[in-house]
Amino acid sequence: MDLPVMPPVKPMLAKSVPEIPPGMQYEAKWDGFRAIVHRDGDEIEIGSRTGKSLTRYFPELVTAFREELPPRCVVDGEIVIVHGGRLDFDRLTERIHPAASRVTLLAGTTPASFIAFDLLALGDEALLDTPLADRRTALARSLSTARPPVHLAPATTDPALAREWFERFEGAGLDGVIAKPLDLPYRPDARLMFKIKHERTADTVVAGFRFHKSGPIIGSLLLGLHDEHGALQHVGVCAAFPMKRRAEMVEELAPLRMPSPEGHPWAAWAEESAHESARLPGAQSRWTGKKDLSWVPLRPELVLEVAYDTLSYTATQAPRFRHTARFRRWRPDRTAESCTYEQLEEPEYNLGDILPS
């Protein structure tokens, strides 16, 4: 491979802002694997956000890139999986598997798509110093005849349309809007773009905690919600606290500590089969390696209001928070039994209206 921009390349990043800024190019914020694709003839390299190769995990995209991308190019975008009219991040994570036979099977049963939104090189020309507006024009021209599963990300300079996307696209699993200055050069690993993400709040049950890696202080709180059958499902964690506060919470939670998980709603958390139909704190997996995932069970009585941005769904389990939830306040006025999934409302929107199949 001999390109003007060679792998590995870390992608340009975005910093959070509360509102959509004016005078920029706007795109939907895709919930997938960020990827920079290098193509030099038949040679394809798919690099992750950290620079590691994703090429072996997505053979169907390698084939598509040879057919749909320019012969020599470097393209920034997002790998996603669409299922049931929305993005499915859980199915996407299943694609990272060590067994080649499993990779081949999943490439057929849960094929991925690629959403292209920036162009770093074309032919023998590096475009890193080229303004975004010109890179976008070149990208649109290069992908004018591209067919699925390769897509050109929708973009606009109309802030009113961007606000409409922010509201409508959430139901398809997209978690916000990205704003990019029109004169912005491409700067790998620099936070020069802006992201505006959804935020909602929910009252959750604190049903356990994990210790911090540094010692006997709180690392994260384990959160739950009751489903329609009254079962307490694990929906995520809340983890961002000052160190002093982490130590204080150990003492505050002590009266609720249980001597063992016996009798706790998540007592079966270490049994792999139990995770097939219920949301439980995670057991060991290829994702966690040797990380200590043991946790301290609490009587599920304490209620915490948290902020979350989006939900993650599977076909067999109740939804969970896609990202780490953020602490808002304790709710002594709420009962644990009142913390149900009915709080978590998301609009519905079919992704097929954004990406033609």
Image: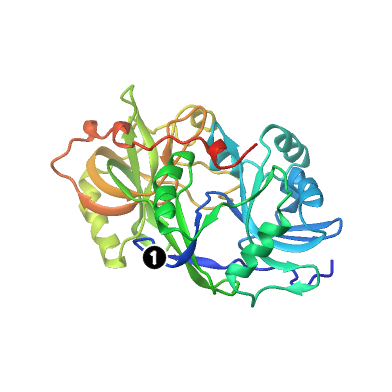
Question: Residue at 58% across / 48% down in the picture?
Answer: 287
Is residue 87 visible to us here?
A: no
Residue 89 or residue 163, whichever sits in front: 163
Secondary structure at numbered mark 1 = loop
**Relative height, residue 205 to residue 122 (above, below):** above
Q: Quadrant of the C terminus?
A: top right
**Relative height, residue 85 to residue 214 (above, below):** above
Q: Residue furthest left?
A: 333
Query: How many discs mark residues in the rendered view?
Result: 1
> Mark 1 sits on what residue?
21
Q: How is the image coloured?
A: rainbow
**Relative height, residue 103 to residue 199 (above, below):** above
Q: Residue 241: where, in percent of width, then height?
A: 31, 61
Q: Residue furthest bottom?
A: 129
Q: Residue 52: where, in percent of width, then height?
A: 68, 61
Q: Residue 351: where, in percent of width, then height?
A: 53, 38
**Relative height, residue 340 to residue 164 (above, below):** above
Residue 20 or residue 305, whichever sits in front: 20
Question: Residue at 62% across / 41% down in the picture?
Answer: 94
Question: Residue at 35% across / 61% down in the picture?
Answer: 19
Is residue 167 visible to us here?
A: yes
The quadrant holding residue 109 is top right
Question: Residue at 39% across / 32% down in the picture?
Answer: 267
The quadrant holding residue 23 is bottom left
Q: Residue furthest right?
A: 42
Residue 114 or residue 135, whichever sits in front: 135
Q: Quadrant of the N terminus?
A: bottom right
Residue 189 or residue 156, whichever sits in front: 156
User: Which amino acid type is shown beneath numbered disc 1?
Assistant: Pro
Q: Residue 248: where, in percent of width, then height?
A: 23, 60
**Number of other residues with Cα within 10 Å of mark 1, as a class: few under 14, some 14 to 19, many 20 or more:** some
